[in-house]
Image (tube, helix red, strand yellow):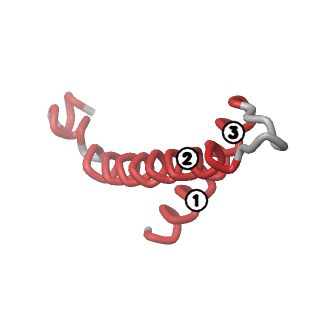
Amino acid sequence: MVLTNGITSVFRGLGPTLLRYVSFSAIYWSSYEQIKRQFSTAATATIPKNDFATNFTSGATAGVIAACRRDNAV
């Protein structure tokens, strides 16, 4: 690619790739922190706080939200 099209051909897809991953990460991490905070405050004396379950559920839910929003936006 570099020999035939020049060095800039290597970076041809950089802009769209960054737009995709930056938007996904922004949605994911903001959703993750909000969901994790809600799970943490919902833990009471009757429901013990489980860090693994909270982190896993928050991450899975945030991932679904970010993936759906990203795919619908494109």
Q: Is residue 51 above or below residue 34?
A: above
- Residue identifier under label 3: 54
The quadrant of the rendering that contains the C terminus is bottom left
| Closer to the camera in the image, 52 or 12 | 52
Q: Secondary structure at mark 2?
A: helix
Give the class, few, some or many, for how many residues have Cα within 10 Å of label 3's Cα (few <14, many ≥20). Answer: some
Where residue 34 sits: x, y (%)? 51, 52
Task: Classify residue 1 as left or right of residue 49.
Answer: left
Which dot, 2 or 3, sits closer to the camera? 2
| Closer to the camera in the image, 46 or 22 | 46
The Cα–Cα distance between marks 1 and 3, rounded to whole angstroms, is 16 Å
The quadrant of the rendering that contains the N terminus is top left
Which dot, 1 or 3, sits closer to the camera? 3
- Residue identifier under label 1: 65
- Say which residue appears at 32% left-offset and 53% top-offset: 19
- Residue identifier under label 2: 37
- Say which residue appears at 71% left-offset and 44% top-offset: 43
- Counting residues from the start of the chain, the first of labels 2 and 3 encountered is 2
- Tag count in the figure? 3
Asked which quadrant contains residue 6, the reply is top left
What is the three-letter code of the residue carrying label 3?
A: Thr
Give the class, few, some or many, for how many residues have Cα within 10 Å of label 1's Cα (few <14, many ≥20). Answer: some
- Say which residue appears at 58% left-offset and 45% top-offset: 36
The Cα–Cα distance between marks 1 and 2, rounded to whole angstroms, is 16 Å
